[in-house]
Image (spheres, rainbow, N blue to C red):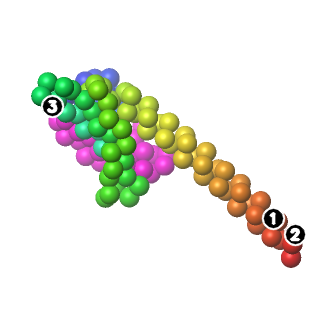
Amino acid sequence: MFDKFETYLLSCGYFEILNWDIDSVEVMSVDTRHYWIMKKFDKEGYPGLVLYHSHDGYKYHVHFCYKEKEIAPAVSEIMSHDRYQKKKKRLRDMITKVSNNELLKAL
């Protein structure tokens, strides 16, 4: 159920593919090490895709639902999520460094 373009998106190096089935794929983002499942479905003639997310690879939650079966929007969402996570980590690191420097000055 994955066409040539979708296969390329999944195997171009951004993801580590963990499990690949006919209508779903489980991947890990190389950047953030977060886990994702993209599951295609067709319920009563209504196609769609559900994007599941996990930090540890065990406890997944629904991250987003799409009205089409294409995975490109889901891949874009994952990349956007990774950018946000990296930005949040940089900010957290910067705040920690400032806090530590202020602490040293106070001593």
Q: Say whether residue 36 is visible.
A: no
Asked if residue 84 lies left or right of residue 13, the reply is: right
Between circles 3 and 2, the one closer to the viewer is 3
Quadrant in the picture for residue 7 = top left
The first of marks 1 and 3 along the sequence is 3
Q: Nearer the viewer, residue 39 or 32?
A: 39
Range drawn in magenta: 13-35
What residue would you read off at disc 2? 105
What residue would you read off at disc 3? 43
Q: Say whether residue 60 is visible.
A: yes
Asked if residue 67 lies left or right of residue 41, the reply is: right
Looking at the rendered structure, the kind of residue marked 1 is Asn
Residue at image point 71% right, 57% down: 95
Residue at image point 25% right, 24% down: 3
Looking at the rendered structure, the kind of residue marked 2 is Lys
What residue would you read off at disc 1? 101
Instruction: Give the quadrant of the C terminus.
Output: bottom right
